[in-house]
Image (tube, rainbow, N blue to C red):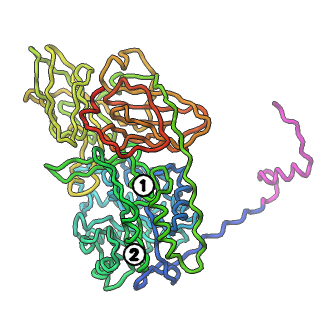
Amino acid sequence: MRMRSVFSGSSLAALLLTLGLSGATPRPRPTPAPAPRHTFTLGTNQFLLDGQPLQLISGELHYPRIPREAWRARLKMAKAMGLNTIGTYVFWNVHEPQPGQYDFTGNNDVAAFVKMAQEEGLWVVLRPSPYVCAEWEFGGYPYWLQNVPGLKVRSQEPQYIAAYSRYLQAVGKQLAPLQVNHGGPILLVQVENEYGSYGADKAYLAQNKRLFEQAGFDGLLYTCDPGPDVAKGHLLGLLPAVNGVDKPSQIRQLVNASHDGHGPYYVAEWYPAWFDWWGTQHHTVPAAQYTPGLDSVLRAGMSINMYMFHGGTTRGFMNGANYKGPGTEYEPQISSYDYDAPLDEAGNPTAKFRAFREVIAKYRPAGAPALPPVPAAKPSMALPAVQLTRAVPLLARLPQPVRSPRPLTFENLKQPYGFVLYRTAVVTSHGGEQLLKLRDLRDYAVVLVNGQRVGTLDRRERQDSLLLQLPAGRVQLDILVENLGRINYGAYLLQNTKGITKSVTLGGNELTGWQMYGLPFASAPAVVASAGPAPTATSGPVLRAATFSLAQPQDTYLDMRQWGKGVVWVNGHNLGRYWAIGPQQTLYVPAEWLKPGQNQVTVLELLKPRQATLSGLDHPILSELHPAAAVLNE
């Protein structure tokens, strides 16, 4: 449609001037005033902001565990509880998923997160060391470090230091300008992370400090360690912070011993609860067990960072695992990082939030404004049942394989996360029972013969063998292996490869001639029903999908109790893993990732291919356990 001209001569000239199309010189736009720079220094007993005491009352929350659309709401909650500071790690594997490929966009835009905290009137404690632990995949390290022969993390090994330095330079470009001495909100920057629990190499710690300074971090640096390990993890000249201690006398003793007999005194990690792993009970602790400790630290004028203030969700395949060596259990962490924290997984205030707020309010500085009112809990809905009518067997959706005489690990295949299907042919002359054995399976396997599931193997249960009943003739053997999360803490960080990491034998004979199909599921798989075996005709894994409609999106929780094991995507967002063994039985769906009208849901189900109904709840279920054997029964 043509537009009729309605501009007068004067209005047209004004428009041209606005667009910069006239010959007149456009009026320069005013330059925003730079943010004020501050000094932040160490006093004898307290931190000093511009020479005045500042008691940090901080809470940890991690930007990748919160939808970017909800960052500001969580920061406002921090203010409402009385926090003046927030803490966050920076996650190497999020920002450099492949060597030299950096990502600081979307949910990974940590600089935007820090700037938003400043807009909300919050200071920031930054924890950008390459190792974070944090119940995070590989403790934050990118998987590809394991592909560098001889590289040793948390050491002076040159290849590690070179990769570490390159990454830290990239982080520095994003965040060094946001330090308080440059006008930003970052008060403190942490060097390494609980290193005293891992080693005691002071030369390595000194090298860390130099790398931070070379990356532009020219403000206050500090170390943090659990009480017994402070001396081993501290570097002379830096502030030693303590973790897991809330007795002021003990805090003083630990800090004074490594800091010339004085403070300031900072509890860098104070735990109001704990995290969960698959197959164990959900951890909860009443607020009354923690309020006395919080009160004592604040009354003593000490600074504190609660880990976690808000845990959120470890989505995608970013959960880590614990493992203490042979004879102990491998413990992969669940997707919910609710943590029984003051803010629950969805960002709503809990009884613990209100109890801590009451304590914090007692120690507000004189003349400080009243705390903001506590925002109401967000509305939530029970999603009506959805029939996932589009379905396709996973084995019908395989990519091109990589061939090798012996099985290749995820790392060999340059695949960080997800699944790999291992396939070979077996020829038996008589059929019958034979023992299948996988050496060092990592971590969970669905075993199929001619497309039908015949069993599972679970590293948690230290299972590596399965008795197969094979027919005579040529048999297709498929082993679908899931990476359940790399170890994030302790001595086994350097033994973290995934997949079938050694060999496969059948009846004592090694199987060769493998095809490997990489299934990283870095994005939601498209599910279009195709010609071929119907999912109801197979007991193998299946992909299911459906479209559902919403009038008004609200938070919801997918009820996975009738399902077996797998992964769910909604509107392209990976919500995390589910597993009917529990304790987590729901997957949190943020309202911010739903939309009015049509929405898409996709499920990868490993164990119950006939399950096709997906329901929702208006609340989470995080404390329901079931025996693993029961989960396998349809």
> Is residue 6 part of the magenta span, yes or no?
yes
Q: Secondary structure at mark 2?
A: helix
Q: Where residue 340 sits in the image (x, y, percent)?
A: 40, 55
Please report the residue visible at 49 percent of the width from the left and 76 percent of the height from the top: 363
Confirm whether residue 129 shows in the render: yes
The front one of 378 and 451 is 378
Please report the residue visible at 42 percent of the width from the left and 18 percent of the height from the top: 530
Residue that lies at the very extreme toward the left in this rendered image: 508
Q: Residues within 10 Å of mark 2 (few under 14, many from 20)?
A: many
- The three-letter code of the residue at mark 1 reads Gly
The front one of 581 and 428 is 581
Query: Residue tagged by mark 1?
Result: 311
Question: Is 130 rendered above or below residue 624?
Answer: below
Query: Residue tagged by mark 2?
Result: 297
Q: Which residues are magenta?
A: 1-26
Q: Where residue 304 sits in the image (x, y, percent)?
A: 41, 71
The front one of 339 and 66 is 339
The quarter of the image holding the N terminus is top right
- Mark 1 vs mark 2, CA separation in Å: 22 Å
Q: Residues within 10 Å of mark 1 (few under 14, many from 20)?
A: many
Question: Is 511 rendered above or below residue 176?
Answer: above
305 left or right, relative to 456 = right
The quarter of the image holding the C terminus is top left
How many numbered marks does the figure carry? 2
Please report the residue visible at 20 percent of the width from the left and 48 percent of the height from the top: 329
Q: Where residue 162 sits in the image (x, y, percent)?
A: 32, 59
- The three-letter code of the residue at mark 2 reads Val
For marks 1 and 2, give the one nearer the viewer: 2
Q: Quadrant of residue 225?
A: bottom left
